[in-house]
Image: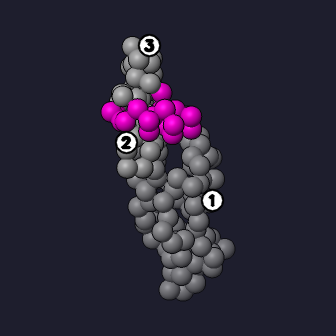
Amino acid sequence: MNVILTENVKGLGNMGDVIKVKPGYARNFLVPNKLAVEASERNLKELEHHRRQLTRKAEKLSQEAAVIKGRIEALECVLSHRAGEEGKLFGSVTSMEIEAALAAKGIEIDRRKIQLEQPIKALGTYEVEIKLNAGVNATLKVVVAKAEE
C-alpha cells in the first residue's frame, strides 16, 4: 500500500515522502496516528500543490535574506566601551548590544541569530556571524573602541 507521510517517521521517511508499506501498518498505525494519508490521486495532487507553494515561499525567503545579508555586510558596527591599560574591557560586548546597534541602523535581527561563541572582552576588530533565514549567513564587522572619558 502506498502512503504519503504527513510527519517525519524515524526509520521510515520524511514528511512528504511517498512510500510503500504493508496495509496493516498503514491501516492500524500510520493513518490513525495521523502520520500518513493514503496515496490517492487527490492526495498526490494536493501534495504537489503544497510542494510548489513551499518552493515559492523558500525562494522568497532566500531573496529577502540575500538583501538583508548585503545590508549587514556593508555595515561596520562601532561600539565604545571603557577599557583598561592593556585593552581589556570593563564588562563585555554581548549579542544584545550588537542587536541594539543593528536596530539603531535600521536592521531588525533577533539576538539569538547572532553567533557569538564568547562575549567580546577586549578592544579590536571582530568578525561576527549572523544566521539569517533560508540557510543564509552574513558576516558583520564589529569594531570595539576605547570610550573617551
Residue drawn 54% across the image and 81% down it: 88
Q: Position of residue 141 (x, y in %)?
A: 43, 57
Disc 3 from disc 1: Cα separation: 49 Å
What residue type is disc 3 on? Arg
What residue type is disc 2 on? Gly
Dot 3 alpha-carbon crowd within 10 angstroms: few under 14, some 14 to 19, many 20 or more: few
Q: Place residue 107 in its image quadrant.
A: top right
Dot 2 alpha-carbon crowd within 10 angstroms: few under 14, some 14 to 19, many 20 or more: some
What residue type is disc 1 on? Met
Mark closer to the chain start, 3 or 2? 2
Residue 31 in magenta stretch: yes
Which residue is denoted by mark 1 in the rendering?
96
Above or below, 113 against 143 in this view is: above
Disc 1 from disc 2: Cα separation: 39 Å
Query: Which stretch did the figure color magenta?
Result: 19-37
Which quadrant of the figure contains the N terminus? Answer: top left
Which residue is denoted by mark 2 in the rendering?
13
Task: Name the one closer to the observer, 85 or 24.
Answer: 24
The reply to whether residue 27 is in sight is yes
| Display colour scheme | one colour
Residue farthest left in this picture:
20
Say which element carries label 2: loop
Residue drawn 50% across the image and 86% down it: 86
Residue drawn 54% across the image and 76% down it: 121
Q: Position of residue 81 (x, y in %)?
A: 61, 70
Q: Place residue 22 in its image quadrant.
A: top left
Mark 3 or 1, closer to the camera: 3
Where residue 42 is drawn, which disc sits there? 3
Mark closer to the chain start, 3 or 1? 3
Say which element carries label 1: helix
